[in-house]
Image: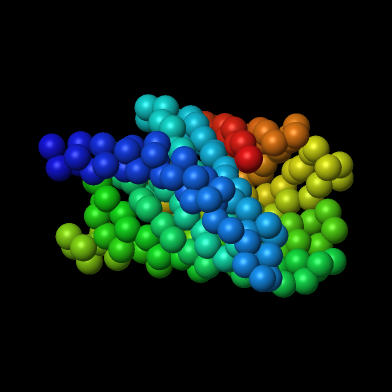
Amino acid sequence: MRTTQYVAALTVIVLFAGPTWAQAASNSKPDSSGTSASNPWSFSLTADGYVVPHAEFFLSPIATADRGWLHLEARYNYENLYTGSLWVGYNVSFGKTLSLSVTPMIGGVLGRTNGVAPGCEASLTYKKVEASVSNEYVFDTASKAGNFYYAWPQLTFSPMAWFRVGAVAQRTKAYHTPVSIQRGFLVGFSHKQLEFTTYVFNPQIDKPTVVLEVGASF
C-alpha cells in the first residue's frame, strides 16, 4: 500500500506539473534584462524500454523541464523497480566551440527504495563528439546496505546531424546481470524533435541487455 501511494503521488505530479510550469512561464513578464524572453521553458519526455535476459520487460520514463538555470526532473523505474524520484537542479554552461554543461541536482527517491540522492548531469561537446554522464548516489533512509551509486556515462560521435554512434556504460540495481558495470554501444537517429536510440549492453555474453529509447523535446 505504501509503494502504491508513492507511485500515485508521483504520477499526479508528473501529469500536472508540466502544464503548471508552462502557465507560470507564459504569465511571467520579462525584466529589464529580458530573462523571460531569453530563457523560455523547455520540456523533454524520454521512455526507455529494457529487454533484460531472464527478466520481464519494463519501461523507465523520464520527464524534464528547464528554464534558464532551473532544472526539474521526474523519473520512474530508474533507481529501482517500482521506484520514482523527483529532482531539482541548477544549469550551468560554458564555452561555444568546446561546450561544457553541468547540472548539479538533489532528489528524493520514493517506492521500493526510499532515500535522498545528490546527483549530477554533465556533458562536454566538441564539434561532432560529445562525452556525457548522468550519475547519483542514493542514501537509503531504511538501511545503509541500500546505499548505491548509479552512473550512465557515454561517448558519442555524430557524423551527420541526424545520426550518432558511440560507447555506453551503466551501473544500476533496477535489474541484475552477470557484470556489475555494464558496457556496450549505441546507435541513434533523430528527426526534428524526436530521437530514437538503441543501446546494447554486454554484447560479449550470449544474451545481451537491449534498451530501446524514444525521446521528444518541445
Q: How is the image coloured?
A: rainbow
Task: For residue 11, say whether it is visible.
Answer: yes
Is residue 71 found left or right of 85 in the rendered image?
right
Residue 84 position, x and y percent, is: 34, 46
Of residues 37 and 217, the one drawn nearer to the viewer in this rendering: 37
Residue name at image x 52 percent, y 59 percent: 71
Residue name at image x 86 percent, y 45 percent: 159
Residue 34 position, x and y percent, is: 68, 65
Task: For residue 134, say whether it is visible.
Answer: no
Q: How many marks?
A: 0
Residue name at image x 79 percent, y 56 percent: 129
Is residue 196 found left or right of 211 in the rendered image?
right
Of residues 52 and 128, the one drawn nearer to the viewer in this rendering: 128
Which quadrant would residue 103 be assigned to in this image? Answer: bottom right
Is residue 82 found left or right of 158 in the rendered image?
left
User: Extreme left residue here?
Assistant: 1
Residue 195 position, x and y percent, is: 67, 35
User: Which image quarter holds the N terminus?
Assistant: top left
Q: Is residue 183 above or below residue 133?
A: above
User: Which image quarter holds the C terminus?
Assistant: top right
Residue 193 position, x and y percent, is: 70, 36
Is residue 140 found left or right of 149 in the rendered image?
left
Residue name at image x 81 percent, y 62 percent: 126
Of residues 204 and 10, the one drawn nearer to the viewer in this rendering: 10
Which quadrant would residue 87 be assigned to in this image? Answer: bottom left
